[in-house]
Amino acid sequence: MDIRIYSLLEGARSARGTAVIIDVFRAYTTAAVAFSRGAEKIILVARVSEALDLRERGAGSLCVGEVDGIRPEGFDFGNSPFELSKADVAGATLIQSTRAGTTGAAAATSARRIYVCSLAVASATARAVLADAPDTVSIVAMGDKGKARTDEDELCALYLRNLIEGRPSDHDAIRSLVRASAHAGNFADASKPWYHPEDMEMALRVDSYPFAMRVAREDGLLVARALRA
């Protein structure tokens, strides 16, 4: 198995084989929380306008996401795992749009299969990838808006690679490095209330959910579903 680590939107466009799109802060932690609360599926889109249009057409019932970290006008929820942990989404179809995570999934057009991932589902994602046994795995750390690398996504990519290759990693070390990162400072900044402190704590609960999140095209849409062993 050839495992390659890429970064940012350019990396998503370069992904081949099985692509794993990583967004720890916060898209794919938010998605994992939604699935843990019983969401049926999540439609992933790059643009806010597309999300709103799909909800208007009845493709989904709730819009989740952000622009510059902030919930867009007309959306039901921000890109916040803490918000979703309090939401009644059982059986719901969500529509998610973010500047990094969902944009990266939409950009991975050359991949044969796509998973979306955060630290919360890394071990389950590794098991799913190993079960698929692809020749090539492209792990993509999406970073800040798909334009600048961030420690949490790069570390998650390395952690996932180690899991697939059967090497152990220290969860506490991962958490310590992420807490010391520049991006983590958003969650302690009182001038940015849309970054709830609990969002970071939830994102750092490594392997807290026992499912992977597999993406497939359904009626022309990118749809993520929880894949349980």
Image (cartoon, rainbow, N blue to C red):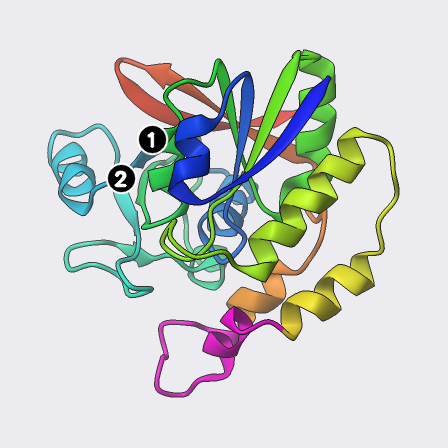
Give the CA separation, mark 1 to mark 2. 6 Å
Please provide the residue range marked out in magenta: 181-197
Element under label 2?
loop
> As rendered, which of 16 and 127 lies closer to the eye?
16
186 is within the stretch colored magenta: yes
The residue where tag 2 is placed is: 46
User: Residue at image x 31%, y 57%?
Assistant: 77
Q: Which mark is residue 106?
A: 1
Where residue 19 sits: x, y (%)?
Answer: 53, 26
> As rendered, which of 186 and 9 lies closer to the eye?
9
Question: Label 2 sits on what residue type?
Answer: Ala
66 is within the stretch colored magenta: no
Where residue 64 sits: x, y (%)?
Answer: 31, 49
Locate residue 59: give its quadrant.
top left
**Count of all numbered marks drawn on residues in the image:** 2
Would you call the spot at circle 2 few (<14 residues within 10 Å), some (14-19), or many (20 or more)?
some
Locate residue 58: give its quadrant.
top left
Residue 100 placement, left or right of 179:
left
Above or below for 125 versus 133: below
Q: Residue 165, can we see it?
A: yes
User: Residue at image x 29%, y 22%?
Assistant: 221
Name the image quarter holding the C terminus.
Answer: top right
Where residue 193 sits: x, y (%)?
Answer: 37, 79
Above or below for 138 versus 33: above
Locate residue 210: give its quadrant.
top right
Question: Label 1 sits on what residue type?
Answer: Ala
Name the image quarter holding the N terminus.
Answer: top right
Residue 20 placement, left or right of 12:
right
Above or below for 151 versus 50: below
Q: Which mark is residue 184?
A: none
The reply to whether callout 1 and callout 2 are in contact (CB within 8 Å) is yes
Q: Residue 229, can we see it?
A: no
